[in-house]
Image (cartoon, grey):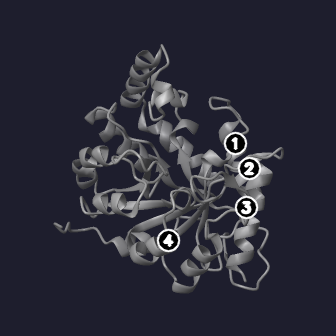
Amino acid sequence: MRKLEKFDRRAFLMSAPLLPLAFGSVARGQTPRAAVPQTVGGIHFGVETFSFHDIPQGNPKLLPDILSNMVAAGIPECEIMSGHIEPFPNISTGWWVQTRRAADFPKMREEARHWRLTVPMDYYVNIRRQFEAAGLRIYYYNINFNETFTDAERDRSFEAAKALGAAAISSSTVLSEAQRLVPFVEKHKFVVAMHNHNNLVDPDQFATPASFEKALAMSPYFMCTLDAGHFTAGNNDAMAFLNKHHDRITNVHLRDRKRNNGPNRPFGQGDTPIKEIILAVRDNKWPVRCYIEYEYGSFRSSEDEVKTCMEYCRNIALS
């Protein structure tokens, strides 16, 4: 694999978020302070903003609610979903097969492309400043690249991620698209972390250790967002993959699922080794971030469920 200068994977993974000095860290056995801690037990916890499902996309209260929910849950950083900051529903990206069947998909896709190529970068900078004003950080920009993206659109997405202050892009994508992204990660010297699902039928999907490893071999700027729940549902061994590739995993999505393509479950009720993952990251001091992704469904608000998930993880990290 060709080595690229000026990129140190370890340095990237070890880099701390740019948080105000008022933020502190919580050592094991200590009671968290009122301020949102930067780390818990030495671990950087965060949340994928997809977890906050209660406010519809496009609602003007969406971003303020995400900010207040993060503060309330004691979570200092996030992976922000493109659908939470772009003025188009997810249909515009065409990631899900169902969306491409919509009668108006071509028109909406073109409108989304035009917006991405013409929106001033100040739009993203303003979003970053809202997080900074709340003492929070956008650490990853989640945009799901696919073959409907033009090269100009791909290039612009990297500029958007930088304007947001993100350290990397996380993407639910496929191997064929990863190959198309190689010149862009090398041009921008910017990490894209591939996010897996559990589609074991399509060989183009990120769903197995082998599929991840194919992308990792394409460029040192490719890393993994290991969704431990999906990985477990696909009957893969999340701990074995973490032990082998922790230096190429930027963050782990913590969700609990049952094996054999089973359902999402509340934390501690599925087969995902959440506890083992947190303890391995903590005890080995791996620079792997642990991000909550709430999806199991509840009559309670997503704000309350994310708090519950974070408390579950906090108790493990401080044990």
Find the residue positioned furthest to the front.
260
Tell me the element at label 4: loop
Q: Nearer the viewer, mark 3 or mark 1?
A: 3
Residue 220 position, x and y percent, is 27, 64
Q: Mark 2 or mark 4: which comes first in sequence?
A: 2
Camera-side residue: 316 or 159? 316
> Can residue 128 be spotted in the picture?
no
Could you tell me the amino acid type at mark 4? Val
Q: Which residue is mark 2?
A: 68
Q: Are marks 1 and 4 in contact (CB under 8 Å)?
A: no
Tell me the element at label 2: helix
Camera-side residue: 213 or 294? 213
Q: Mark 2 or mark 3: which comes first in sequence?
A: 2
Q: Are marks 2 and 1 in contact (CB under 8 Å)?
A: yes
Q: Are marks 3 and 1 in contact (CB under 8 Å)?
A: no
Q: Nearer the viewer, mark 1 or mark 4?
A: 4
**Label 3, label 1: how many angstroms apart (C-alpha)?**
21 Å
**Label 4, label 3: how many angstroms apart (C-alpha)?**
18 Å
**Label 2, label 4: how many angstroms apart (C-alpha)?**
25 Å
Q: Which residue is mark 4?
A: 288
Tell me the element at label 1: helix
Residue 4 position, x and y percent, is 20, 66
| Number of other residues with Cα within 10 Å of mark 1, as a class: few under 14, some 14 to 19, many 20 or more | few
Find the residue positioned furthest to the right.
299
Could you tell me the amino acid type at mark 1? Pro
The relative height of residue 8 versus residue 212 in the rendered view (above or below) is below
Task: Answer with left or right where residue 304 lies relative to residue 314.
Answer: right
Q: Mark 1 or mark 4: which comes first in sequence?
A: 1
Q: Which residue is mark 1?
A: 64
Q: Nearer the viewer, mark 2 or mark 4?
A: 4
Q: Which mark is residue 269?
A: none
Residue shown at 39% from the left, 64% from the top: 209
